[in-house]
Image: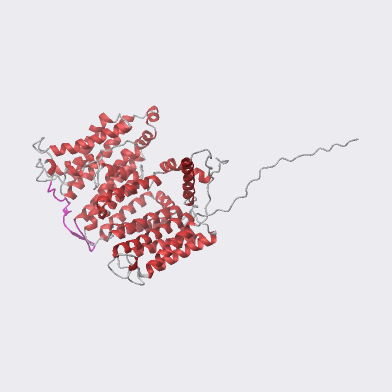
């Protein structure tokens, strides 16, 4: 009898690969990388107290041991931030609050800030003085220390996203494109931050004190930036401030401050304007108050445009014309000898005339054109802006009626006098002497406050929700019963009126109103292109976004004049890079931020199976 044996074959079970430990962009053990980054930050701080060059011919006097000067202060700040974040990543008691969302991504950005500023300084010294031979040992130490910190920061481990392999049947060009995309995805994942841990509940007075400190720090940074005395220092300031702010955002501090400001909105708004009002008292003369008042005019007009573009979604390319209407209307009734009307109204009358005139033009232009959408509306508004400029240029008594004095404009606009306070004279307040432009700065700040309140109340009202509905989907909004034409016309008229308010002050600040001030695009803001860029750069639909965007877009070109004919090229490249890597703006609306990044963040958090 034959015995048959049956063999059972066990199927091979797919083995799940063991999870690999996270690694960094540079192959170093995690503990070595963290120690290297922290030590590099400390060494960077120490190097700032050494001499970097032997001669004071380089601006900032970097020849002194024991006391940093000029760009050394900025490198010191970058190094100190790197060292503090490195210690916070170790869980050092008293520093955990510095990185509620994790410290590793923030360490990378702060190390970049110190490295970029230090190496820019070293290169600038060599270029200005004729070679690196003019460096003292301290300059080499600073360059080496920041490089060590950068290497350690880039070696910090992070969770790598799962990547798709390139198709072997693809062409080499397609494979290269695919692999480059994978490498870029990994690089972005290295800078990904976690969700900030919930903050400990503090008493209301403590949270208000924190907000006060943040606002005071903001005033200090703005005052330092606007008062940079030479070109190299301003570029270093941009590098340190830009990467430093990005590091604090990745660490989660910006989110916590935003949460505090949201809980105390009125206090935050009053505090912000109080900090801005303190700016003229930090200046010894009127030089930077001139830039300050022009920044406020530009930012206020950008905030008015934000109603049209950010809330309602209407692309207006001729918005600067409403600023011009307000300025011309106010100039004609303010007692200028160039005005065809022998009228000298007080300021309150002139500002009402300017705002109402701009509003009327907004209604007249909007009524026949707001039934258009998209590109067609943009073309019509662009045409209106050019028609306004050409029309006021031709109203010189020769080509047309004598109203605007043609290309010469309306000149010799007198200074404002409100309740006996002459804005054209110097005044002493609490022991501080403030000049003409500081006076107008404070007046413009008050008007900016009015515009902010109007924007905020409008955005939160029923009409504001209708604007947002139109922006998101006009067809759906019309189907829900919203009168789209009326809602858009209100937005157009209100935005025009707010621009007219700023134009009234601009006419008195500049003494003269000419057609060349109100072009679509020009090297010097305000113009329609820069106004639209300020809204998009700062963050559409927010209050602080256009104010910050307007301040940057006015200040940076003013400080980059040393680039000459390359000024707009450098500025344009910077805008392109910013819009590529942060398309939602510097201070984005939360909804728009999610819209821009919902697809980009998924690979870093989900596996293929999880998705």
Q: Residue 155 or 73: which is nearer the viewer? A: 155
Q: Position of residue 348 (x, y in %)?
A: 19, 45
In the orientation shown, which residue stands out farthest toward the front? 172
Left or right: 590 in relation to 531 = right
Q: Residue at x 27, y 67 (%)?
A: 57
The answer to whether residue 334 of the structure is visible from this angle is: yes
Query: How many marks are shown on the rendered structure?
Result: 0
| Residue 525 locus on image (x, y percent) | 25, 47
In the depicted structure, whether residue 527 falls above or below residue 204: above
Q: Is residue 418 magenta?
A: yes
Instruction: Compare residues 433 and 69 and report the one nearer the observer.
Output: 69
Quadrant in the picture for the N terminus: top right
Q: Which residues are magenta?
A: 411-435
User: Furthest residue to the right?
Assistant: 1
Q: Position of residue 54 (x, y in %)?
A: 32, 71
Q: Main secondary structure of the magenta part?
A: loop
Determine whether, in the image, residue 350 is placed left or right of residue 266.
left
| Residue 359 counted in the magenta span | no
Q: From the viewer's perspective, tell me whether residue 510 is left or right of residue 192.
A: left
Relative to residue 81, is residue 608 drawn left or right? right
Residue 358 vertical position relative to residue 418 in the rendered view, above or below: above
Tell me which colouring the rendered structure shows.
secondary structure
Q: Quadrant of residue 162?
A: top right
Instruction: List x then y, in percent, for residue 4.
Output: 85, 36
Indicate the quadrant containing the C terminus: top left, top right, bottom left or bottom right. Answer: top right
Q: Is residue 94 visible?
A: no
């Amino acid at each position: 009898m034959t015995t048959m044996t049956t063999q059972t074959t066990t199927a091979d079970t797919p083995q799940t690969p063991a999870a690999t430990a996270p690694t960094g962009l540079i192959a170093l053990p995690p503990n070595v990388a963290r120690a290297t980054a922290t030590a590099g930050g400390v060494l960077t701080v120490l190097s700032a107290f050494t001499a970097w060059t032997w001669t004071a011919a380089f601006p900032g006097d970097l020849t002194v041991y024991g006391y940093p000067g000029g760009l050394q202060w900025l490198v010191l700040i970058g190094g100190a931030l790197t060292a503090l974040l490195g210690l916070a990543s170790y869980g050092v008691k008293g520093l955990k609050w510095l990185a509620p969302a994790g410290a590793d991504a923030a360490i990378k950005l702060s190390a970049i800030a110190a490295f970029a500023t230090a190496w820019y300084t070293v290169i600038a010294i060599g270029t200005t003085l004729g070679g690196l031979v003019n460096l003292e040992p301290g300059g080499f130490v600073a360059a080496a220390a920041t490089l060590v910190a950068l290497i350690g920061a880039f070696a910090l481990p992070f969770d790598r996203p799962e990547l798709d392999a390139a198709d072997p049947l693809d062409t080499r060009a397609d494979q290269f494109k695919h692999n480059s995309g994978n490498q870029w995805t990994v690089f972005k994942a290295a800078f990904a931050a976690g969700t900030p841990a919930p903050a400990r509940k503090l008493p209301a007075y403590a949270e208000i004190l924190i907000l006060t400190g943040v606002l005071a720090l903001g005033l200090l940074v703005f005052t330092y930036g606007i008062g940079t005395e030479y070109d190299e220092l301003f570029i270093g300031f941009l590098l340190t401030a830009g990467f430093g702010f990005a590091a604090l955002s990745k660490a989660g501090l910006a989110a916590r401050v935003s949460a505090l400001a949201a809980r105390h909105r009125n206090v935050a708004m009053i505090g912000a304007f109080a900090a801005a009002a303190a700016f003229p008292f930090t200046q010894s003369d009127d030089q930077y108050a001139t830039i300050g008042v022009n920044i406020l005019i530009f930012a206020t007009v950008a905030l008015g445009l934000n109603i049209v573009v950010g809330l309602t979604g209407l692309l207006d390319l001729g918005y600067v014309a409403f600023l011009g209407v307000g300025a011309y209307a106010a100039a004609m009734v303010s007692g200028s000898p160039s005005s065809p009307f022998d009228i000298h109204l007080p300021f309150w009358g002139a500002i009402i005339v300017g705002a109402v005139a701009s509003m009327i033009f907004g209604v007249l232009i909007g009524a026949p054109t707001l039934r258009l959408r998209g590109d067609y509306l943009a073309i019509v508004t662009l045409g209106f802006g050019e028609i306004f400029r050409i029309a006021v240029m031709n109203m010189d008594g020769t080509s047309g009626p004598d109203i605007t004095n043609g290309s010469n404009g309306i000149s010799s606009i007198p200074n404002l006098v409100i309740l006996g306070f002459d804005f054209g004279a110097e005044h002493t307040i609490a022991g501080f002497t403030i000049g003409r432009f500081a006076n107008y700065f404070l007046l413009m700040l008050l008007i900016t406050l009015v515009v902010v309140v109007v924007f905020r109340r409008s955005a939160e009202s029923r009409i504001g929700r209708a604007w947002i509905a139109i922006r998101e989907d006009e067809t759906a909004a019309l189907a829900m019963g919203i009168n789209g034409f009326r809602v858009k016309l209100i937005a157009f008229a209100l935005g025009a009126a707010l621009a007219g308010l700023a134009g009234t002050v601009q006419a008195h600040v500049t003494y003269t109103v000419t057609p060349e001030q109100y072009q679509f695009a020009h090297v010097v803001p305000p113009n329609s292109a820069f106004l639209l860029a300020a809204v998009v750069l700062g963050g559409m639909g927010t209050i602080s976004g256009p104010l910050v965007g307007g301040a940057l877009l006015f200040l940076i070109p003013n400080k980059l004049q040393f680039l000459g004919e390359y000024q707009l090229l450098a500025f344009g490249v910077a805008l392109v890079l910013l819009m590529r890597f942060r398309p939602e703006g510097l201070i984005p609306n939360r909804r728009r931020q999610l819209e821009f990044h919902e697809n980009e963040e998924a690979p870093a958090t989900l596996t293929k199976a999880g998705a």
